Image: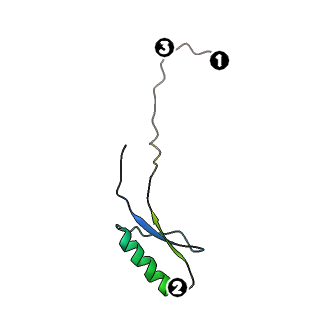
Amino acid sequence: MDTFETFWMVWCRGGGPPTEMHITQSIAEAEAKRLAMTHRGKEFVVLQSMRSVRIADVQWREADPNADVHF
């Protein structure tokens, strides 16, 4: 299985989507605390990445010109 480096993000309930990736949990927690102190009464959640998915590029296949196709 292919892997990627784990990262953390801070999300505000009722706010927009998170945009900044943090390289450690402690950095994300410090940012969540800073934001909570700046925006009293709002809840900030520290999110950790677990998995990702990527759809493969388009792949072309050649038809077999000798195939017996019936329409």
Farthest residue, direction right:
71
The mark lying in front, picked from 3 and 2, is 2
Q: Residues within 10 Å of mark 2 (few under 14, many from 20)?
A: few
Q: CA distance from mark 1 to mark 2?
A: 66 Å
Q: CA distance from mark 1 to mark 3?
A: 15 Å
Task: From the image, tell me which residue sits under label 3.
Answer: 66
The mark lying in front, picked from 1 and 2, is 2
50 left or right, relative to 2: right
Q: Nearer the viewer, residue 24 or 56?
A: 24
Where is residue 37? Give x, y as percent: 48, 86
Chain-order first, disc 3 or disc 2: 2
- Looking at the rendered structure, the secondary structure element under dot 3 is loop
Identity, as a three-letter code, of the amino acid under mark 3: Asn
Q: How is the image coloured?
A: rainbow
Task: From the image, tell me which residue sits under label 1.
Answer: 71
Q: Quadrant where the N terminus lies? A: top left
Q: Residue at x 36, y 49 (%)?
A: 3
Above or below residue 31? Residue 60 is above
Q: Residues within 10 Å of mark 1 (few under 14, many from 20)?
A: few
26 left or right, relative to 15: left
- Looking at the rendered structure, the secondary structure element under dot 2 is loop
Identity, as a three-letter code, of the amino acid under mark 2: His
Q: Residue at x 52, y 85 (%)?
A: 39
Where is residue 24? Give x, y as percent: 35, 68
Identity, as a three-letter code, of the amino acid under mark 1: Phe
Q: Residues within 10 Å of mark 3 (few under 14, many from 20)?
A: few
Task: From the image, tell me which residue sits under label 2.
Answer: 39
Q: Quadrant where the C terminus lies? A: top right
Q: Residue at x 42, y 70 (%)?
A: 20
Chain-order first, disc 1 or disc 2: 2
Q: Residue at x 51, y 15 (%)?
A: 67
